[in-house]
Image: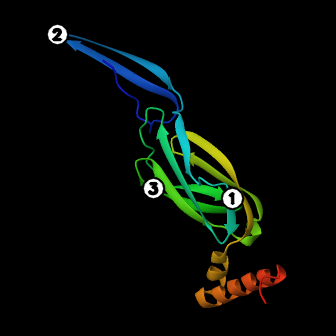
């Protein structure tokens, strides 16, 4: 017969004992086998865009399975966006997601790094980059509240129109 070594088995040597029994005869043999790390396949599902404005949210969503398509089962995974750690929560079947709010200090290229460890010496990491340039009106709404944010945004638009000589 055969048996499957579960993913939760630590890599390294695994001692096994095989016992055979047939009618009145019995025998056994002991041996050691080497358990190698299991490969984890990691796919970044989101972000799908690579350009963001300050004030927008970057949704980070991943799909993680072992090489035989068995979903990775963890409560959460940490991701690093820029210099901030965000938590990606499991939504089931190997899918994890989290949100990062883009800040004005993120101007330029921001890396999104996902590194995971299933707790049994099986690891994988992946990194992508996104560009941040400009400020979304959402930034002003979040910082100053809806009414003040809208007034500030309107003032910026009027100033822009004035500079283009489009407002009398």
Which of discs 1 and 3 lies nearer the camera? The answer is 1
Q: Secondary structure at mark 2?
A: loop
Q: Residue tagged by mark 3?
A: 90
- Where residue 39 sits in the image (x, y, percent)? 53, 34
Q: Residues within 10 Å of mark 3 (few under 14, many from 20)?
A: many
Residue 161 appearing in the image? yes
Q: Which mark is residue 24?
A: 2
Q: Which mark is residue 51?
A: 1
Which of discs 3 and 2 lies nearer the camera? The answer is 3
On screen, residue 126 versus residue 88, left or right, reads right
Q: Alpha-carbon distance for marks 1 and 3?
A: 26 Å
Q: Alpha-carbon distance for marks 3 and 2?
A: 52 Å
Q: Residue at x 43, y 43 (%)?
A: 71
Q: Which mark sits nearer the N-terminus, 3 or 2?
A: 2
Q: Nearer the viewer, residue 19 or 104?
A: 104
**Measured along the vertical axis of the image, is residue 108 above or below residue 142?**
above
Location of residue 60 (image quadrant): bottom right
- Where residue 128 sits in the image (x, y, percent)? 67, 49
Q: Secondary structure at mark 3?
A: strand
Q: Assign the C terminus to one quadrant of the image.
A: bottom right
- Where residue 32 sits in the image (x, y, percent)? 47, 21
Residue 121 appearing in the image? no
On screen, residue 62 versus residue 161, left or right, reads left
Q: Which mark sits nearer the N-terminus, 2 or 1?
A: 2
Q: Secondary structure at mark 1?
A: strand
Location of residue 37 (image quadrant): top right
Q: Residue at x 77, y 86 (%)?
A: 167
- Where residue 152 sits in the image (x, y, percent)? 70, 87
Q: Nearer the viewer, residue 43 or 75?
A: 43
Q: Are marks 3 and 2 in contact (CB under 8 Å)?
A: no
Q: Nearer the viewer, residue 161 or 135?
A: 161
């Amino acid at each position: 017969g055969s048996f499957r070594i579960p993913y939760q088995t630590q890599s390294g040597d695994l001692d096994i004992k095989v016992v055979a029994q047939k009618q009145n005869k019995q025998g056994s043999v002991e041996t050691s086998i080497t358990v190698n790390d299991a490969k984890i396949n990691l796919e970044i599902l989101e972000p799908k865009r690579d350009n963001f404005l300050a004030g927008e949210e970057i949704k980070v969503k991943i799909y993680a399975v072992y090489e035989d398509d068995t979903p990775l089962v963890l409560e959460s995974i940490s991701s690093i966006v820029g210099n901030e750690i965000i938590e990606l929560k499991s939504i089931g079947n190997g899918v994890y997601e989290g949100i990062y709010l883009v800040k004005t200090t993120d101007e330029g290229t921001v890396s999104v790094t996902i590194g995971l460890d299933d707790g049994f010496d099986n690891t994988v990491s992946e990194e992508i980059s996104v560009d941040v340039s400009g400020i979304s009106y959402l930034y002003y709404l979040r910082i100053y509240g809806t009414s003040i944010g809208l007034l500030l945004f309107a003032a910026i638009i009027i100033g822009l129109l004035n500079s283009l000589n489009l407002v009398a």
